[in-house]
Image (cartoon, grey):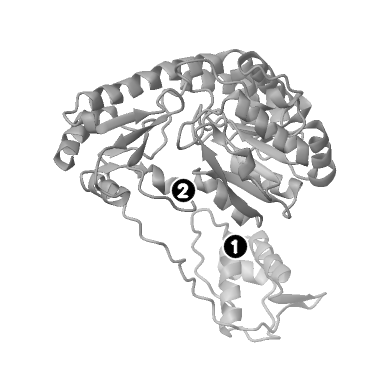
Amino acid sequence: MLTYELKKAPGVPLYEALYRCIRADILSGKLAPGEKLPSKRALAQNLEVSKITVEGAYNQLLAEGYIRSQEKVGYFVEAVDRRPAPVPVPAPRAEKAEQAWLLDLTANGAQQFPFSVWSRLQREVMLDYGETLLSPLHNQGAPELRRAIADHLAAFRGMHVDPENILIGAGTDFLYNLLIQLLGRDRVYAVEEPGYSKIRKIYAAGGVACVSAPMDGLGVIPTGLPGADVLHCSPSHHFPTGLVTPVSRRMELLDWAKGAGKWIIEDDYDSEFRFDAHPVPAMLALDGGERVIYMNTFSKTLAPSIRISYMILPAALMDQFQKQLGFYSCTVASFEQYTLARFLSRGYFEKHINRMRKFYKSRRNRVISLLEQSPHYHRLTILEEDAGLHFLLKVDTDLSDQELTARLRSVGIRVKALSGYYHDGTEDLHTLVVNYSGLREEALETALDRLKSIM
């Protein structure tokens, strides 16, 4: 008769504890193939457990093939390949020493998130939608959110778009990969040089050819795109240079796209943060919905963890998407979409943006003011400070960019040089990209004191 001391572990039913004991005996050879097991009643009496417990253990062993049942005879041990249990090998992890920076001028931040408003809207959504939140959404996203986005763009960006041409996705990374599948991997993608390196990495990982789109003081040079089929650009506020592409150059780029049947992906990721004027009209508004694919995200304006982005496809391209990729489900939870829809439609997003413009403008002014008070300000030149959440700081120095950033790191200041954003390489530009959205203001004066020591 089988004898076990069954100890019920937290969260483990008693029948599973018995199943594990019998399975271990089978795998170890203590129970030989063909050996008959005790009846359910006999084993239950011997172990002082219920018959249901034994029945549950036997049923699990039967389902996994450790035993067999012979009607009116009983249960017998099956012949099982007794391989030694594999020893789990932990995945190698790169040891990354987290340094506590005095001032991190590369990190993005999320400031003054409207928690009270957001949580109130979430409670409303839970009460109003109830079990509807458990149902699948339209593959383009909740109609309420798409209408709210269209209304917002019409009011604040002068863009009149059909909600049926808007597609919601969990972050722009996901949407870029959808575009690769939609437009085709045989196309050549051009990305701005200099530019945000992650975009180039996403396209490369997607298996498409990627080339650099050269820029001048007005933005991407249309004549510098031979062989390119798709241009990925950010004309409203280029990162990292901060350039804003004027209307004349935008029209040239649109002519390039229309004349050759190309596509332009307009990345409008932080156009909301302009301090000197209203946001510049989007290229989509100039295009008329033919060759421009517009893309934006709420991760920058609300919080990085809110992975809600959207793109606007020309009508013909949206029709192609539904035919070719319509099997994809929407990747953003309905709960978050309905909450954001109300946040937009009730004017909370506009208020939040206005509040954040004032907040970031004040922070930018404080950073610049402290730089101006520095005894070494005559060796500094501030560029492109009127848009976005960063500016350029040109330094009059004989140090290379690598030496300059290394010396800044040595005193606890993390910052990246503009030359580091050139994929094809460039000479030292002696220019730093100062991202002030995530810095700690209380550390500014200490950081500038340390800066004196290396100037």
The type of residue carrying mark 1 is Glu
Q: Residue at x 36, y 43 (%)?
A: 429
* Res. 102 image quadrant: top left
Of all residues, the one furthest to the left in this rendering is: 453
* Structural distance between the alpha carbons of marks 2 and 1: 59 Å
Q: What numbered label is drawn on residue 422?
A: 2
Which mark is nearer the camera, 2 or 1?
2
370 or 383: nearer the viewer: 383
Relative horizontal placement of residue 324, taking residue 193 as reference (left or right): right
Residue 341: quarter of image: top right
Residue 30: x, y in percent?
57, 84
Q: Residue 434, how many percent across, how many down?
A: 36, 35
> Which x, y percent locates residue 73?
79, 78
Residue 169 can be seen in this image: yes
Q: Report helix, strand or loop for mark 2.
A: loop
Instruction: Report whether 386 appears left or right of 221.
Output: left
User: Earlier along the polypeptide chain: callout 2 or callout 1?
Assistant: 1
Image coords of residue 273 (percent x, y)? 48, 23
Q: Is residue 211 above or below residue 34?
A: above
- At a point 82% along the width and 74% down the height, the residue shown is 71
In the image, 389 versus 23, the foreground residue is 389
Q: Amino acid at mark 2?
A: Tyr
Q: Please name whichever residue, 222 or 453, is drawn nearer the observer in this view of the structure.
A: 222
- 140 lies left or right of 446: right
- Give the position of the N terminus as an image quadrant: bottom right
The residue to which callout 1 is attached is: 16
Q: Residue at x 68, y 44 (%)?
A: 230
| Residue 311 in sight here | no
- Residue furthest out toward the front: 223
Disc 2 packing (10 Å; few <14; some 14–19; many ≥20): some
Kindly state the secondary structure of the residue where label 1 is placed.
helix
Judging depth in this view, the residue of 350 and 232 nearest the camera is: 232
